[in-house]
Every structure is written in C-alpha cells, then in structure tokens.
Image: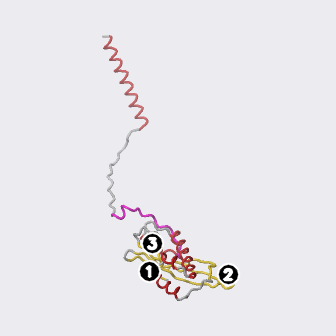
C-alpha cells in the first residue's frame, strides 16, 4: 500500500501545480467581462485596378498648380514636385538642344509631330545658338486633361534669356507647352506634344 500512497501524493501535487498555473494565467491574461457583440466585418470589394494599386491621398496644392489634382486621380504614383522639376529640366534641355540644332537630344523628348516641326526649323536654319537662360520659372498649370488613356498637362513657363553672354540683352518670354504621357505606361518620361 505504500506504493499506492505515493501515486496519490503525486496526483495531489500535480493537481496543485495545475491549479496554481491556471490561477496565474487567469491573472496575467485577465478575464472577459460585460457583453461583447460579435461583429462580422464585411469584406471590401475592390475592382481589379484597385486591388493592384492602393491610391495615395492627394496633397494640398497651391492655387497656381491646383489643376494637378486630376493627374493625382489618373496616375497612382504621380508626384507634382518631381513632375514640375522634370518639366523645367525638359524645357531648358529642349530649348538648348534646339538652339544648337541637336536633333539627337530632341527626338526622345518630343512627340513625332512636334519633332517634325522642330526638325524643319533646324533644317531651315531658323535657330539662334547665341541665347542662354538667365532664369526659368513655371507660372502656372493652364490645363490638365485625360482622354483615351492619355494625360496631358499644359504649363505656362516664364523664361529670361540673354544673348552672347551679355546680361544687358535679357529678354522675357512666355511659353505654353503641353506634355503628355500614356497613363498605363511604365515609362516615367513625358513627351512635349504642343508648343
């Protein structure tokens, strides 16, 4: 009977340890009180486009560029700061390349129609390589349109240029240029489609 008594003592010890562990777990985890309503969340139904891309919020835009909200709605990864900086760089690059008669630089930056008109002007020697930029600013966004999978952004540039390194010859010019891009294109580049 001694052997049976030891088993009984072991059972009591294990039961005590189990009770202690349950008590400690209850204190650590807490217990559920009050009425908790079970809610069943409705799954959000997304279109194919939305399920692939999560739309970013449209930032606050100054009044002179507020029309760019349309670009944010059309292109998920649109960034107005990058676009405007790229447009300024493109304007300067295109004008300088045109004045030098550099068709190779111009071709990937222009649509076919605009390139043809620039090419004709270069071939007829209707260029002035003596002009340099003094300043270049974007005055405002004139228009933004989306049509047939294309987005077009029309920008008014104000530039000051001078001739033959003589700042006394500074002239102020206003140009309205339109840049376009296929919305679904993976290519980040915009092309000049109208001047």
Q: Which mark is residue 157?
A: none
Horizontal side of residue 15 vs 97, given as left or right: left
Give the distance between the C-alpha atoms of the residues marked 1 and 2, in whole angstroms: 33 Å
- Mark 2 vs 3, N-terminal side: 3
Residue 57 to residue 130: above or below:
above
At 48% from the left and 85% from the top, the residue drawn is: 117
Q: Nearer the viewer, mark 2 or mark 3?
A: 2
Horizontal side of residue 161 vs 65, given as left or right: right
Q: Nearer the viewer, residue 36 or 195?
A: 195
- Read off the magenta span: 48-64
At 59% from the left and 85% from the top, the residue drawn is: 128
> Which residue has dot 1 on it?
112
Membership of 62 in magenta stretch:
yes
Secondary structure category for the residue under label 2 = loop
Residue 121, position as x, y percentages in the image: 52, 87
Within 10 Å of disc 1 (Cα), the crowding (few <14, some 14-19, many 20+) is some
> Which residue has dot 3 on it?
71
Residue 162, position as x, y percentages in the image: 64, 83
Figure quadrant of the N terminus = top left
Secondary structure category for the residue under label 3 = helix
């Amino acid at each position: 009977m001694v052997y049976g008594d030891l088993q009984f003592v072991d059972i009591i010890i294990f039961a005590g340890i189990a009770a202690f562990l349950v008590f400690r777990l209850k204190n650590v985890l807490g217990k559920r009180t009050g009425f908790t309503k079970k809610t069943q969340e409705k799954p959000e139904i997304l279109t194919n486009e939305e399920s692939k891309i999560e739309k970013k919020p449209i930032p606050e835009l100054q009044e002179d560029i507020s029309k760019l909200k349309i670009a944010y709605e059309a292109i998920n990864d649109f960034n107005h700061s990058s676009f405007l900086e790229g447009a300024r760089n493109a304007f300067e690059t295109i004008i300088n390349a045109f004045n030098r008669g550099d068709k190779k630089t111009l071709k990937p930056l222009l649509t076919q129609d605009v390139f043809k008109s620039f090419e004709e002007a270069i071939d007829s020697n209707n260029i002035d390589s003596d002009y340099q930029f003094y300043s270049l600013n974007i005055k405002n966004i004139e228009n933004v349109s989306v049509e047939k999978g294309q987005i077009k952004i029309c920008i008014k540039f104000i530039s000051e240029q001078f001739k033959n390194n003589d700042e006394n010859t500074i002239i102020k010019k206003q140009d309205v240029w339109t840049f376009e891009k296929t919305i679904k294109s993976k290519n980040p580049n915009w092309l000049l489609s109208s001047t």
